[in-house]
Image: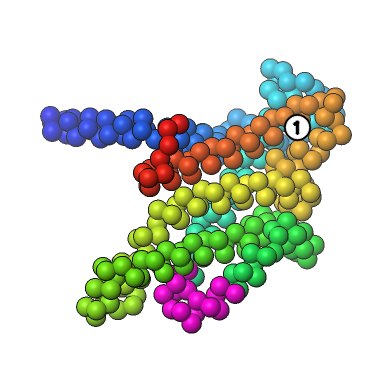
Amino acid sequence: MSDLAISTVFLRRRGFATFIGRNRRIALGGGVILFMILAAAAAPLYAGNPNIMNPMVRLEAPSATHWFGTDALGRDVFARTVYGAQISLAIGLSVAVLAVGLGMLIGLPAGYYRRFDALVMRVMDGLMSIPSILLAIALVALTHGGVPIVIVAILLPEMPREVRLVRAIVLSVRERPFVEAAIAGGARTRKVLLRHILPSTFAPLTVQGTYVCASAILVEAALSFLGAGVPPSIPTWGNMIASSQLYLGLAPWTMFFPGVALAVLVLAVNLLGDGLRDHLDPRLARSL
């Protein structure tokens, strides 16, 4: 490797270390999320089957054999907690990506075309008035549930917030001189929207997407706790906490570990969002 290449690698590593040092929220939150993603993805390699029942070891305390103990049916709590991360991450990330994507798709024309704006905003106001938990219960009653239904039930009340955010940005940016200059220069509407206005939405939507992800994870846990989420045969943190209520005094570990995992993941996502907000808008930066 040449001296120039070595110097380039050194500078990149030094720049990355400097970025991490200045953005500890991003480092901490992103590190925890990355660890959970890797742990959930590799679960089949080390966690075993989360649905295997062994009545001989039911409600067994944490030990070298069962790190997080067992539940009332003799299932390994560690395996179920790890597999529960798959559902929470999948639903949280899916809702965040879909909400941001639909927010850009609907919010851009809504903020640019005034007549279209009035219609879209009334529809968004109607969707925001629907509680996600009640909507999920209704959808589950009609369709027998499943992960896609839960995603739709959480997405519909979350999406209007993204649409309104993009619309507000478009209304502000379209009055700026560089956009007016592009319009006066004969640029097509599509080019104005995609090249001059759309980039201004990336930073706010990135930050908002993390908060939507955290909210979706919490709502999914609440739905599973109420029995309106994914089927009980699929381990989730919500249904693990719900099923352990009767044994809280006898076997608190059955509720403790999934509860801690849920709290840590939501906290990490919020930390990442706070760090991204402070990095993308230095005016809001605070010391950790």
Q: Which residue is mark 1?
A: 255
Q: Which residues are magenta?
A: 107-122
Describe the element under mark 1 as helix, strand or loop: helix
| Percent x, y of residue 53 | 80, 33
| Percent x, y of residue 21 | 36, 30
Q: On the rendered image, what quadrant is the N terminus found in?
A: top left
What amino acid type should be assigned to the residue bearing mark 1?
Met
Q: Residue placed at 54% from the left, 54% from the top?
A: 96
| Percent x, y of residue 263 | 63, 36
Residue 111 included in the magenta stretch of the image: yes
Could you tell whether 59 is left or right of 181 in the image?
right
What secondary structure predominates along the stretch shown in magenta? helix
**Which of these two is toward me, 173 or 270?**
173
Mark 1 closeness class: few <14, some 14–19, many ≥20 residues within 10 Å? many
Could you tell whether 39 is left or right of 22 in the image?
right
Residue at the far bottom: name it: 115
Residue 8 visible in the shown view: yes
Residue 165 included in the magenta stretch of the image: no
Quarter location, residue 3 = top left
Q: Residue placed at 57% from the left, 37% from the top?
A: 267
**Is 47 drawn above or below residue 238 in the view shown?**
above
Could you tell whether 248 is left or right of 206 in the image?
right
Q: Residue placed at 76% from the left, 38% from the top?
A: 241
Residue 54 visible in the shown view: no
